[in-house]
Image: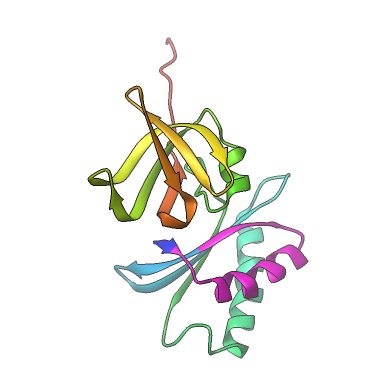
Amino acid sequence: MRRAPESIWNFISPIVEGLHYQFVGVSLGQAESGLTLRVYIDHEDGITVDDCARVSNVVSAGLDVEDDLLSGEYFLEVSSPGMERPLFSAEQYAEQIGQTVKARLLVPQAGRRNFTGVLKEVDGDEISLEIDGETFNLAIRDIDNANLVAKFSRGKS
């Protein structure tokens, strides 16, 4: 899944915010079941299945009217960002400094497309990831998709 085109963002964002949810982002990609549009929402009180259904119904109705945004059949998924929250904007990255981030680039940099490391800094439209003591600066516009890496600790039984 990759970031959806701006036209889709610009259409969906005000719908989600008009329903009093935080619009986290939207991705578009080919899944096993076909073209999938995934909308991520959040709320200070958390997200329930009913919240997702509400947003899904309104977004779906809007997309049915604006049929030039997506051609052909697609599957619409609405969910909370979850523990492995996707990251789309500089603001979202800035909120996660110190966390482990996994990023896949559109084109290779330093001979690789996949980077997993600790987010050290956000400077304008660029992030810095520290991986094994080395710092990699990645332009946000070059990131195909990125998300937090969930960490689990073992407690004593």
Q: Measured along the vertical axis of the image, is residue 140 above or below residue 101? A: below
Quarter holding residue 65: bottom right
Q: Measured along the vertical axis of the image, is residue 9 above or below residue 128? A: below
Q: Measured along the vertical axis of the image, is residue 62 above or below residue 15? A: below
Quarter holding residue 129: top left
* Residue appearing at x 35%, y 50% in the figure: 104
Compare residues 133 and 3 and report the one nearer the observer.
133
Residue 18 falls inside the magenta stretch: yes
* Residue appearing at x 47%, y 42% in the figure: 84
Along the horizontal axis of the image, is 36 left or right of 98?
left
Where in the figure is residue 36, as x and y percent of width and height? 42, 70
* Residue appearing at x 46%, y 36% in the figure: 128
Q: Measured along the vertical axis of the image, is residue 129 above or below residue 10? A: above
* Residue appearing at x 71%, y 69% in the figure: 14
Highlighted magenta segment, given as a residue range? 3-26
Where in the figure is residue 19, as x and y percent of width and height? 75, 65
Where in the figure is residue 109, as x and y percent of width and height? 30, 47
Considering the image in quadrants, where does the N terminus appear? Answer: bottom left
Residue 36 falls inside the magenta stretch: no
